[in-house]
Structure formats: C-alpha cells, structure tokens
Amino acid sequence: MKLAKLDFLLRYPDHFNRLMAVRQPDVDAGEDPWLTGTIEQSMIRYKYGPWDPAYYALLGALTGKGLIEPKHEDAIATYCTTSAGHEVARALTESESWRPVRDRAVLLRRYFNLTGITLKNLIYETFPDIVEAHWGTHL
C-alpha cells in the first residue's frame, strides 16, 4: 500500500532525509515534523515494506467518520478523501502546530508521488537493513 510507504517516510525523518539526500541532494528536507524525535508506535517489516497493523483500524475510523471512502481498482484497495475529509485536512494545514507535518507532506508528494511498488523498491534499495529484517520485526 502506497500509504504505508509514505507514512514510513513521514514517521522516520532520518530515513526520509537519507532518501532525499540520494534522490534530491539539492533540496532542503525541511524541519523534522516530530520535533521530539519520538515515534508513537514503530512500524513492522512485512513482505511489501514497512507496515503498521493500526492502519486497518485507522482507515476504518476515517471511513466511519465520513472523512475518506474506499475505492477498489481491480484487486487494489484505495481510499479517497471526501469533501468533509478535505475540510478537516485544510483546517490542519492552516494550523501552525501541524506546519512541519504539512511541509513534509508537500515534499513527499512532490518527490515521492510514485507507485507503492516503486516506493517499496526505493526503500529497499536505499535501506538494506530493512530488507534484511525478518518479517514482523519492528523497524
């Protein structure tokens, strides 16, 4: 899932910075969105890259609140924001406390708006320690 790879790069700023230095060495990676340097819950390595088991509950909650809606393209599950979801996202982007996250999301969209498979391959090529981790290992 593309969302998981982008979330990985958002939640692990050191990995994001290393990947930016490889792919876009002349671009300022900006401020670390997690100023404390802590991550609430670590991600797990699975077959298709970093994964957080909480995604299912989060996506369900966002769907239940009418902020996103599931779409299915062939065997691939995708999600789109609803108009209510856009309003919430816009309000967050205007909040100063969310500015570092917004700025990082802008960089992710600009430089890493790739397919999920391409992102997985890029992460695996750049971070061999993730590839070598056993499935289910916390990253």
Image (cartoon, rainbow, N blue to C red):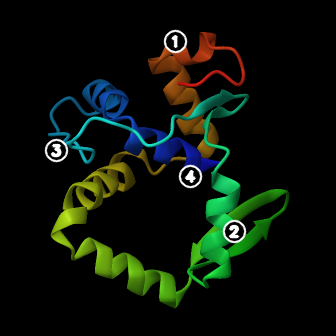
Name the residue nearer the viewer: 94 or 19. Answer: 94
Disc 4 residue type? Leu
Which residue is painted at 57% across and 46% down in the image?
4
- List the residue tagged with mark 4: 3
Q: Nearer the viewer, mark 1 or mark 2?
A: 2
**x and y, in percent, of residue 83 in the image:** 50, 89
Which circle's residue, 2 or 4, is located before the other in the chain? 4
Determine the CA span between mark 4 and mark 1: 21 Å
- List the residue tagged with mark 1: 129
Determine the CA span between mark 3 and mark 1: 25 Å
* Disc marking residue 69: none
How many residues crowd mark 1 within 10 Å: few (<14), some (14–19), many (20+)?
few
Task: Say left or right for 15 vs 134.
Answer: left
How many residues crowd mark 3 within 10 Å: few (<14), some (14–19), many (20+)?
few
Which circle's residue, 3 or 4, is located before the other in the chain? 4
Which residue is painted at 62% across and 31% down in the image?
44
**x and y, in percent, of residue 71 in the image:** 73, 72
Residue 115 visible to an observer of this rendering: no
Determine the CA span between mark 3 and mark 4: 21 Å
Task: Say left or right for 81 vs 24.
Answer: right
Which circle's residue, 3 or 2, is located before the other in the chain? 3
- List the residue tagged with mark 2: 60
Q: Secondary structure at mark 3?
A: loop
Q: Do the numbered discs 2 and 4 sit on residues whose CB atoms are within 8 Å?
A: no
Disc 1 residue type? Asp
Q: Secondary structure at mark 2?
A: helix
* Disc marking residue 30: 3
Name the residue nearer the viewer: 102 or 35. Answer: 35
